[in-house]
Image (cartoon, helix red, strand yellow):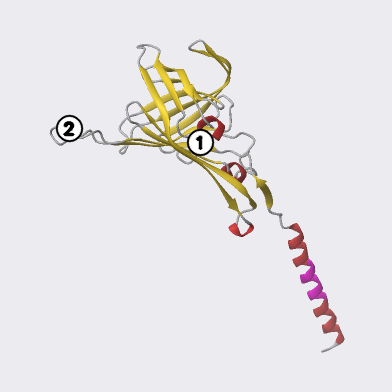
Amino acid sequence: MPMKKIAYVLFVCICLTGCTKCKEKNKEPITDYGVYTPPIVLGDYCCFKKNSYWVYQDSATGKIDCTYVTNAQVTTYTVNANSGKDYTGVFHYYNMYTKDGIGDERQYEVYDEDAAQSASCCGGRYYCAVHWNRPAGPIDSMGGSTPGIYFGAYTFMFNNFIDGTTGGGGISGGHGDECWSRGTVDNLNVQTTIYNDVKVFEFYKTAGLSYPYPTKIKNYIVKNIGVVKRIDLDSNRTWLLKRYNVIQ
């Protein structure tokens, strides 16, 4: 091979090697979160251990209702370098089931990994999702029962406490559902008890084929306690926390 051609081949090889090294050098490193804790831990607001309970009173009629935790778990799992994601770490999954006085069952779920996953594009947005179900009633003397109702999934709250912000998961918006942050109340008097730093979230769900009942609810939520006040906006019926026992 002529010397001129050999020199050209060597030049091309050097250039290609340089480009490869450049690409490897510019490749963004994988973020290692270690044991990850998001800046705002939503599990502190909406996930509690079994045997936790809240007793509420209707401010208009004096009627009492109770919500209690029937089951709950906090699971840790690892995302490693082979996951195909741009981060690694150990993350928490919160899962809680509750039941109230009329038998409604709710499942609350929080994935801390969602905050890490969206850290580079959405300010670490993540949310607490709820699945709401009313089981069928007991069988009566005629062999019939009240049919069950699946109210669907909705966003209970998300990690942005600025008034007017809307957000949550894919279940919000586009499906007749929406969740808004209504800001923070510094001091809230509920049944003569003063609660501080109360987060307010409003939830709307329109009626659909699988869900015949529209719902509009405003929740007042306190860290490490849960909901201290709830307003059913359609009827303006207000439930106030009377007493509680929470385990976290």
Residue at 68% over, 50% down = 32
Q: How many marks?
A: 2
Q: In which quadrant is the C terminus drawn? A: top right
Relative placement, left or right, of 4 versus 89 is right
* Residue 8 on the magenta segment: no
Q: In which quadrant is the N terminus drawn? A: bottom right
Residue 111 appears in view: yes
| Span shown in magenta | 11-18
Question: Residue beneath label 1, please?
Answer: 128
**Quarter of the image holding residue 231?**
top left
Q: Are dots 1 and 2 in contact, CB under 8 Å?
A: no
Q: Position of residue 217 (x, y in %)?
A: 42, 24
Residue at 60% over, 43% down = 118
Q: Position of residue 169 (x, y in %)?
A: 49, 39
Three-letter residue code for mark 1:
Cys
Q: Nearer the viewer, residue 173 or 33?
A: 33
Q: Nearer the viewer, residue 216 or 8?
A: 216
Q: How many neighbours does mark 2 have within 10 angstroms: few (below 14), some (14-19), or many (20 or more)?
A: few
Relative placement, left or right, of 13 versus 191 is right
Q: Which mark is residue 216?
A: none
What secondary structure is found at the residue carrying circle 2? loop
Q: Position of residue 122 (x, y in %)?
A: 61, 40
The mark that comes first in sequence, 1 or 2, is: 1
Question: Residue beneath label 2, please?
Answer: 140
**Quarter of the image holding residue 26?**
bottom right
Three-letter residue code for mark 2:
Asp
Marks 1 and 2, Cα distance to the nearest angstrom? 37 Å
Residue at 86% over, 83% down = 4
Q: Position of residue 126 (x, y in %)?
A: 56, 38
Most common SS among magenta residues? helix
Q: How many neighbours does mark 1 have within 10 angstroms: few (below 14), some (14-19), or many (20 or more)?
A: many
